[in-house]
Amino acid sequence: MAVETAARQPLLLTRIADAREWVSRERRAGCRIGLVPTMGALHAGHGSLAARARSECDRVVATVFVNPTQFAPHEDFQRYPRTLAADLTLLGGIGVDMVFAPDAGEMYRGGATHAGTGAGASGVAATSVIPSTVAATLEGECRPGHFAGVATVVLKLFHIVPADVAYFGAKDYQQTLVLRRMVEDLDVPIRIEVCPTIRESDGLAMSSRNRYLSPEERERALSLSRGLAAAERAFAAGERSAAVLEQLARRELELAGAGPIDYVALADPETLDRPQRAGDRAVLLIAARVGGTRLIDNRMLQ
Ligand code: AMP
């Protein structure tokens, strides 16, 4: 008789001290630790990061924390989906060993407010990270204080879970640049790996926020990936004008009635400077609202 073995649930820890102790024990045993920071409401995009960590590390830790300091007061912090039971099942199926899911009181013992409202650039009441200039543009302009909140919480997670490698998604392209600079500038001994964006079969980049979309909005949301694909085709055919490539993508959004558009930006892949003409490589980034939902996507043109 075949016996089905249920996927093992990861160990769930909610206290910083317990997570730190677990990680230091595994490190002392010589284990290589992989870390996957998330805000939960997990989907196959997050799953791909965990699977990559699973294939490269002896122990895999995922964190689930909806970080208040990276949300502005008018943003969706309160209604952000919280699905911890389902997240644990997904992570267990991939073989994640430990999940660290603290509450805000545990992470910010000195108190925390929302992005842009605290004493410093982020919402952290006490000490916080001021990210590099790569955080100033695009998302940084649209969401003041957002990257200070992200950099601060990620640095805290890196201290609580001193991993060998941390895995992030290219879906949040600017975030990966901000965090790479942070570990470089602050000498954090963690390697950052960036994993490709996982998409639905019709091209929509997976996102926890996609569940906010009505069926009709989801159709309109496809214009982001369609716009990027249109620009990519033109780039492959030799088009290098930033204005033309951006307009091709923007047109798809406008045709679909997506908007307001926060930006459609062709940028240097390392600095996010905005060239008039693309070089051999450029990244095209989009942020736009569809209904009440703000979506981002990007594509490397090369
Ligand atoms: P979040 O829970 O949205 O903070 O995302 C946690 C991590 O998962 C970040 O590094 C994201 O870039 C990554 N991620 C989110 N969506 C995707 C996706 N569709 N494909 C790959 N990685 C993703």
Image (cartoon, rainbow, N blue to C red):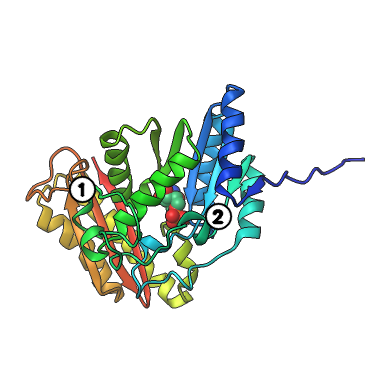
The residue sitting at 47% across, 73% down in the picture is: 78
Nearer to us of marks 2 and 1 is 2
Q: Secondary structure at mark 1?
A: helix
Q: Residues within 10 Å of mark 2 (few under 14, many from 20)?
A: some
Residue bearing the label numbered 2: 102
Indicate the quadrant containing the N terminus: top left, top right, bottom left or bottom right: top right
Closer to the camera in the image, 187 or 250: 187
Q: Position of residue 154 (x, y in %)?
A: 40, 47
Q: Position of residue 125 (x, y in %)?
A: 35, 61
* Quadrant placement of the C terminus: top left
Q: Secondary structure at mark 2?
A: loop
Q: Is residue 51 above or below residue 217?
A: above
Q: CA distance from mark 2 to mark 1?
A: 29 Å
Q: Report the side of 263 relative to 213 (left or right).
A: left
The location of residue 56, given as percent across then percent down, is 52, 29
- Mark 1 CB lies closer than 8 A to ligand 1: no
For residue 17, which quarter of the picture?
A: top right
Say what amino acid the circle numbered 2 marks.
Pro
Residue occupied by mark 1:
134
Q: Residues within 10 Å of mark 1 (few under 14, many from 20)?
A: some
Amino acid bearing label 1: Val
Question: Going by the image, does 216 lie left or right of 87?
Answer: left
Q: How many marks?
A: 2
Question: What residue is shown at x 25% (from left), y 63% (from top)?
Answer: 144
Q: Nearer the viewer, residue 46 or 70?
A: 70
The residue positioned 49% from the left and 61% from the top of the image is 104
Question: Which residue extends farthest top?
Answer: 30
